[in-house]
Each structure stands twice: as structure tokens, then as C-alpha cells.
Image (spheres, grey):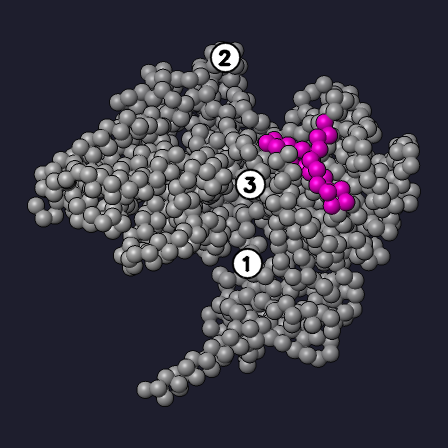
Amino acid sequence: MKNIRTICTFLFGVMVLLFFGLVYPHHLHYQEQYQLFLFDSTYVWEIIKQPGGIADLLGRFSTQFFLFAWVGALIIAILLSTVQILTLQLDSSWTSQAAKSSEGWLYGLSFVPSCLLWLYLLDENALLSGVWAVLITLFAAWGIAKLVRGRTRYILLIIAIPILYWIVGPVCIPFPIDSLWTGIHYYRYPTVFPVLLWAASLSVFILTLTIHICHRRINTSSSDIVTFCSFALAATCMGYLVWRCSNFKAEKVMQYDFMACHQQWNRIIETINKEKPNNQIGVTVQNLALAMHGMLLDHMFEYNQNGIAGLLPDVKTDATSPLSTAEAFYQLGMINVAQRTVFEAQEAILDFQKSGRCYKRLAQTNLINGSYEVARKYLMALQKTLFYRKWANETLVLLGNEKAIANHPEYGRLRQMAYKEDFYFSDHVTPEMLESLYFSNTDNGMAYQYLIAYYLLTGDREGLNHFNSKK
Amino acid sequence: MKRYNHYFFQLIAVATLLLSSCASHPDVPSSSKNTKSLPAIFPDYCNVTVPYNIAPLNFMLPADKYEACVARISTPDGQQQTYGNGVKVQIPEAEWHSMLNASKGKSLKVEVWGLKKGEWFSFIPFEIRVAKEPIDEYLSYRLIEPSYVAWTFMEIAQRNLTSFEETQIFNNEITMNDREKGQCINCHSYQNYKTNNMLFHVRLSNAGTVIVNDGKISKVNMKRNYTISSGVYPSWHPTAKLIAFSTNLTRQAFHTENANKIEVYDLASDLILYDVETDSVSVVSNDSTLLEVYPTWSPDGKHLYYCKSVPLPEEMRDKDIRTTYPKIQYNLYRRSFDVTTHNFGDEELVYDAASQDKSATLPRISPDGRYLLFAQGQYGCFHIRHNDGDIVCIQLGQENPSPLNLTNLNSEGRPDSYPSWSSNGHWVMCASRREDGNFCRVYFSYFNNGKVEKAFMLPQEDPEHNTFLLKSYNRPEFMVEPVRISVNEFSKVFDK
């Protein structure tokens, strides 16, 4: 078959697409919510002035599309397929065995860098900038090989390395020197050495060398069947490795968080009925969805519970777990508490980025509180984004418009449910806080459910009786 | 063809020149409708008094109401210049400084026109009075999100007040070896407005106080087994290598409904004196029943001023501070100090805020020793989070001093705090959340013989900068010279 290599690349791309689209979509949502790409010259300059800045910028730009998991999956599929194609081209261009290296049994090896990058992306803290860095390096190496030959090629390569270093970071110099790799924005923890990314960049060099050596010793068959078998073998190995290394538990947690973020209460109920969540975020979201349907008190013990930590857990200093708790605070009408929780979550993003989700919620809580000028600041930032702009424009119109806010199905309701009397709180939610909220507006069924659930989960009969006597 | 090319490029050059001249020096509208009001410019620089060395007071009309803005600035000697680029008025530094120099002790007249729906409107002209006294050339502040407990990237930056140059003194990115633990940098302080002797704190990962002593950097830990914490709020002695600190057990709690949102309070706080030369710590005051905080030296170094809480009513003493916090009020005290023996005299009450149901914090004495500035709210020690927080100034040496009129400096219903004096005593600075109640900005007021002029916001090259900046200016401090030690040099002290 003439286009066997195109078919193999296409099949690989489809594998990646289906994996991220069907199996790992919430990892993509997770990535998106911990960054905020701004169409703003200062923001862009701040990124590109750092080593690896161009790769970082491209990574951040692409990640904003992860809001839509299938688009994100497509982007990753295209990137990884391109890496494979460029690896193949590079092997051909930089070895004297031009035609031979791209087919036969060795063909499957061209998928190794892409496979390593795929494994790298399974980690929710691995950033897409790493993939862009490898791709740009490959593209540069391929371009040099195409442009010039002989000794000039090597001279040009040496000249290109410092420039490439500035564009993509240390991916272009795959030496495992810790100080070189840490601090580059390939990974959410800048102090972590991204082993898989390093291995991916190193594999390109090793492969080129291997093919160069092997072709002199092995008489490789160029038949399509052998090429395809080589791909099939590589694909099987990749599939096995990816499946083994995937974090399905994290994916499930991210799914609950995603559903809570998008207020998909029915979908949450369907999901918990299929499989009862047994992690803190899952249980928090499960209880929130039950309460939103007014089912919490009747059905909470049909599902796993985790005491008060599954209802309104203490706010921890990480970027993930507080967000679903903040959603519960928000829906309860504890607007200041929700605001604080979201703010803390955003501050805990380890690579100092901002979050579209958090900015949105900060704008909403300030709007509900009547702090319109603060809300405006967050909305103006969101106006500089691709996917939050429309929402920001629609919300900006509401600022200061008391009548429109009162009639708004969400903000109007939450204003009515909010505290009427101040209550001083610390890090723990107490029944007094919920009681105060309930007595601020006895129509607040959420507060009622959460308060009774609190007493039931903590076994505080005395508190429950005391509350019933006050009712 | 070549000839046409030549004309084409000439045309482009002329058009570019015309465009650029239009952008920086536009024509005044030939006709306009008079609004009979002052222009609603941001920042509000109408009728302010500024130092003759301040950076250009760039401003803008609201972009959602106007399409363009033109301003004509006239100097007392009759020279005029127009500015306007869209709704923004951005004045080149050289032109601005030459206008200010020509106006020392006099006023600049500013006329503003705004284009709205194709029609030009004119406003009542305003003045910018130019004081003869300069402002200190540098200002440093911590740039931080208006956070609760957690924080992210933060920096201590320095700004040249005569231009728009801003550079980093230090940031928490490069020295944070434990990112999960985090690293907080705060409370920078200088001896006598100079930077050769200075300090700032680092908390959590790589914790310590970074002290620059005659240009030499070291990191010290001031915690001793007889102190409740390491040094927190500092004040350099003006002449000796001594630093007074408060030691604090600080906590935060949050309001569910109150617009103040956050309450910062101390469970305990004392005062210590740190000797930089000998690395020794001595206790100044450690009354376990009361809270002492915010030490500050008089300019001659002969007195240490500080805040101390008044005892709570008997019935409240054993209760949780989260219920008693609205009753915790601080008065201002001072103790004499002998720089040779390091001995302190008896405590004297300087200002009794509690008797007026108020709480006074953050005292600062004017360089001539005549005036005392402080922040005052109804309760507590952290007025930058209190909407009733205002700056108060009293004349020292009077038996019952009455506060000066600072309505030109304070905002209404928004926190104003962290007051300080310029080294010549003619400029008062404060941090204020007056724009939106959340993000702190820096304001300056001209001070002369107890009179304070209208405050103006720290000017920025792009007047919209303060609209988009989602950070607060925290703890602004005047300096007469820049910090010359680089971020990398500071970071080396963390390797040791």
C-alpha cells in the first residue's frame, strides 16, 4: 500500500483522540481551569521573555481550548502525530539511509517520542508546553537538515541551539542537568524534573543514532506488511503502557469536580447511582447534588458518607479540593465563604497561574455582594479571553443594575439566601454558621438540609434537638 | 515605477508624522458643549498639589462613556501643549518635567474635552498646583493579591517616583524551595529612608529576616526561647544599628456578611529590640495580658512609640477573641530610649484613642518631630481591612491634641491605612482601598504646617494600569535612594 505510513500516523492520531476524548476528558478540563490565557500584550511578554517562553505560550494558548474536551483531544492528537511524523522525517534526514529508516521493522520506533509524550500528558501536572517544546525542536532540526547539508548543517545546528533554548527551553539539550530543567514551565511544580519529557526529547536523539547504526547492520524489509506490523506492535505496547499508567481514579474525581462546576446536578445523580463515590470530592459533590434536588436528608445514607469532611470539608491549601466545597458554599448562599474558598484555591495554583473558573466565581460573588467595582476588575480580565469573553460581557451589564440582579435566577436567589447578620468564622464550618444562615431566610432549603445533615453525620442529637426547639 | 515608489514612501512618511503628531499633540476641538462640571478623569487629579519632581500625571476619561479625550495644559509663563490619545492623556516625561519646573510654587492649568457620540464636551478647567518641595525619589511596596490566608507569587518592588521605572527588590519565586509550603515575603524597612541598612522578612520555607547591614546581606532568625515569635513589624533606629520589632501570634478569621470580610488579630504580641551588630535580642515590653505592637522611633531616636491594647472589661477577659475582637482597642504610647545604654524609660500615654471608642495603630512621627500620623478605626490593629479605617494626624507636645483636618487625605467608607512621611515631611503617603474596597493603591498628599491638600494616586504610565491590576500595593515605604542589591544577590543568602 502506498500510504501505509500515513494510515499508521492517522490510526495513532485516532487512538490519541479517542483516549483523551473518551477516557481522559476531565484531565483536559482540569488543565484548562488552572490557567487563564489572556489576549494581552503584557501577559504575552511576561511569558515569552522567559527561557522556553514560546513553547510555554503555545502550550497555554492550546490549553484554553481544553474547555471543550474533544477539541483538546484533537489538539493533542495532532501534536503527537506531528511529533511522530517529524521524528520519522528527522531519522531519514539525519541518517544516510534516507528511505530505509522510515519503513520496515524499525518504523515502529518513530512512535517512541510520541508515546513518551502521551505518557507524560497522563500526569495532570504535566503541561502542554513540553509537547510544543519537543515539536518545535524536531521541526527546527528537520528544517536544518532540509536546508543544508554537510558540515554547514552541524554548524547551523550549533548556532540554533542557544536560540532554540530560548524558544523551547532545555528540551533541545537533553542532558539531565537538574538546574537546567527545573524552573522551566513544563510542569506545574517548577522544581520537579519532568523525567518523561526529558526521555521523550532524548529518545529522538537516540533513535536517530540507533537507526543510523542499525541500518548498517540489519537488512530491513521495506514491505508494507512489515511496516504495518511494526506499527501494530508499537501501538499495542503504547496502549498497554498508557492504560497501565493512566490515573482513572483522578479522572473520576475530576469528573465530579467538572460536573459540580457546570452544575450538572442530574448527571451527578445518574453517576452516583451507577457507582457510589468514595473520595472526598466525589462525596462532597454527591451531597451537593442531592441537596440541590432536595433529596439530601432522605437519601444521603444510601451513599457513602465521610462525616462532615464529605459535607463541607475544611478548606485545604491546594488548588483542587476547595473548588467543589466552594461550589457548595456558593449554592448554600454563603457568599463570603465561597469567595474566600475560591480565592484560596486560586492562590494555591502552584505555577502562579490564574484560573478562568476562579475569576468567574470571584466576579459572581462580588456581584452578589454588591462589590461591583471589584467584580468589574475580574470581568475586564475575562474580557481578554477567548471563551469567557461572552459571559463577561453579559455579566458586566448586570453590574449596578439591582433590578436585573434581583430577577436573575441565580444571583437573585443567592442574594435572598445570603446571611442577614454577620457571623465570624474561621477555618471550620460549624452548625452555628448553618443555623445562622437558615434563620436569615427560612426558605433556604439548602441550609436546612445541610444543617440537619451536619447533625446526623456528627451524631449531635443534642444540637439537633436544640435546633428543633428553636424552629 | 521607481518614481511612484518614491512618492508612495514620501506619502507614508508624511502620514506617519501627521498621525504621530495627532496622537501626542492633538488639536483642541473648534466647538464644544460646556458641561459646567469637572471632568470625571481617572485617576482624579483635579486640583491636586504635586511635587515638582513627580512622574507625569497621566489620566483618562471613562472608556465606556467617551470616545476621545483632549487635554490642554498651560504653564504660568503662558506656554501650552495639548495631549490625547483615544480617551487617554499620556504626557511625555521630558515635556512634563519641563512644565513642572516652569511652575514651581505655581499652578498648571488643565482644560479637558471629551468626545461623546460624535460631539465634543468641555469641562471646567482644573489646576495642578506644583509645590516647591520635592518628594523622595523612590518608593517601595509589596505587590500582592488581596489575599486571605494563601498567597501565590509576590514581590517587593521599587518605583522611581520621578519616572515610571519599576524594578524588583525581591520575589518569592527563586528562593522557595518548598513550593507546597510556600514562601511569604513582607515587612520591608529602611534606616532613615536609605537602603544601605534595610530588611525584609521571609516566612515559611527558607524563613528568616534578611538584613542588609552597611550593604552586607545576612539572614537571621530572631526567635529566642523567651520571645513569642521572631521579629514581625520592624522599625530601624535612625542612628544606631538597632531595630525595634513587635513579636506577634497573628491569626485571621472571616466575616460571613460584614463588608470588612477579614479580621486580622493578635493572640499575643510583645516588643523586642534587636542589635544588628551583636545579633542579640532584648525584650522591651512583654505584658502577657496586653498586646503591644507597631513600634516606631522618633526621628531623633530618643523615643520609641508603639501601640498597646487597653484591658478588656472584666466580663470579657476569658472569652474567645473571636467574640471579643470588636472590643480590642489600642492606644499610642512612647518610652524614652538611651542609645548608649539601650535602656528604656517609663511608658507615657501619647494618644488615648480608646476613650473615644477608637483604636489607634501604625504611628509615624514627622521628620521634624512635630506631628504624629497614625491609622485609626473603631477596633483592632489591622485597619487596612476596616472600612472605617482612616489616617489621623495630631500635633505632638500638646496636652490634649485635637486631630488635624485630614478630609483631603482620607476616603469615605473605605479603608485608609499605613501612613508615612516623606523625608522632608511635606508629603504624606497612605495605602487605601478607596477605588473599589478591595485593591490597595498608594496616595500622596501635600502637607504644610498642619494643612493637608487633596490626595492623588501614584501615577502610572498607562492610566488604565490601576484598573486592570489585580494586586494590592502593600506597605508602601519612601526611600531617598534605590535598593542597589539585585534579586539574585538577595537570593544567594538563602543558599547558605
- Counting from the top left corner in percent of width and height, residue B125 is at 65, 71
| Camera-side mark, 1 or 3 | 3
Q: Which mark is residue B173?
A: 3
**Would residue B209 be counted in the magenta stretch?**
yes
- Range shown magenta: B201-223
As drawn, which residue projects farthest toward the left?
Answer: A1
**Would residue B348 be counted in the magenta stretch?**
no
Closer to the camera in the image, B444 or B215: B215
From where the camera sits, is residue A356 visible? no
- Location of mark 2 (residue): A460
Residue kind at label 1, given as amino acid type: Glu
Does the CB distance between marks 1 and 3 fall below 8 Å? no
Residue kind at label 3, given as amino acid type: Glu
Cα separation between marks 1 and 2: 54 Å
- Location of mark 1 (residue): B464
Compared to residue B433, the image places residue B286 above or below, namely above
Does the CB distance between marks 3 and 2 fall below 8 Å? no
- Number of numbered labels in the structure image: 3
Q: Residue at x 20, y 42 (%)?
A: A216
Q: Which mark is residue B410?
A: none
